[in-house]
Amino acid sequence: MQNRITELFNIEYPLIQAGMIWASGWKLASAVSNAGGLGIIGAGSMYPEVLREHILKCKKATNKPFGVNVPMLYPDVEKIMEIIIKAEVKIVFTSAGNPKTWTNHLQAHGIKVVHVVSSVKFALKSQEAGVDAVVAEGFEAGGHNGRDETTTLTLIPMVKEQLEIPLIAAGGIASGRGMLAAMVLGADAVQIGSRFVASNEASSHQSFKELVVQAKEGDTQLTLKELAPVRLLKNKFFEDVQELYQQAPSKEDLIELLGRARAKKGMFEGDLVEGELEIGQIAGLIHDIKSAAQIVADIISEFETAKKEINLL
């Protein structure tokens, strides 16, 4: 399965595990990399010293390539980047910020840089900034999303039409058939998040994993657009947000309700009532919790089977 992405990252399969807050530590990243994909440590929920520890443990657990995802709005982003460079991490996925800020600096240290976007406009800005590849993420995805609500099905071919550098598709992909569909639309690879939340190695709370497996169609919704659009599983906190909207709240009212560390409370500590539970629409197709290696194997096997079926049409 060699293509521009497998060659860029020196991996076996064009399959990338998303760097998710409270879910993707060194155990998950190393397991995915060992299985032939690209594992990503999610720095967004880590203090700098915690990230350093995860990088060192990941290096001991795999001799395969892995990366780190860095939301650039992170308050300690300078310390995070310094740690990444000193630890000689070779791949960085940036998000939630201007790709011009860090791309040249990271590349000067031999690091491949990928930026996550939700529109054609920002994909082209990322290409102009010199990134090595782009992740185009549709609004089916879990967690924070683009404001335009462009779906993966329409976003990928629109980006592909204008982009010259490698393209990675994300949002609503959790199976081999989804992977094949994204690549038919023009992607060189896929980035998968929600499916890996329901893995043995994910650092998210077991209760959250079990709730993801139980999720059905319509159990997630995008909300809090005035702050930063986020897709959540519906629970008491979500209903509290909806109730507040009935009162025409100010931005300050929403900030007060959200409070601090609510995502940690939900996804990491397992408070399924008051916590913020970020997951994608594709949760309705996730029916079990299994090892990351088995997830990768299942996706690739289904991808190959689906490709053969299409050839028979």
Image (spheres, rainbow, N blue to C red):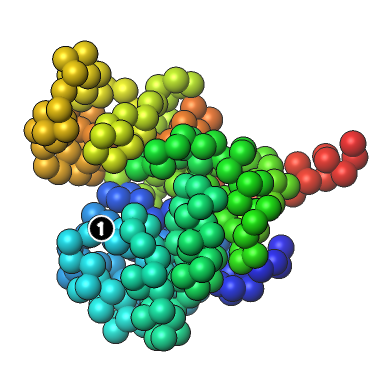
Of residue 16 and residue 157, the one placed in the foreground of this image is 157
Image-based side of 52 in relation to 190, left or right:
left
Asked which quadrant contains residue 53, the reply is bottom left
The residue at the far right in this view is: 312
Q: Give the percent coordinates (x, y) of residue 167.
A: 60, 58
Q: Residue at x 66, y 68 (%)?
A: 4
Quadrant of image for the C terminus: top right
Image-based side of 88 in relation to 38, left or right:
left
Say whether residue 206 is visible. no
- SS for callout 1: loop
Q: In the figure, 218 relative to 184: above or below?
A: above
Amino acid at pointer 1: Leu
Q: Give the percent coordinates (x, y) of residue 211.
A: 35, 29
Of residue 229 and residue 279, the one placed in the foreground of this image is 229
Q: Give the percent coordinates (x, y) of residue 125.
A: 48, 61
Q: Residue at x 83, y 45 (%)?
A: 308
Q: Give the percent coordinates (x, y) of residue 154.
A: 61, 38
Image-based side of 261 in relation to 35, left or right:
left
Residue at the disc numbered 1: 73
Q: Residue at x 21, y 23 (%)?
A: 241
Image-based side of 69 in relation to 139, left or right:
left
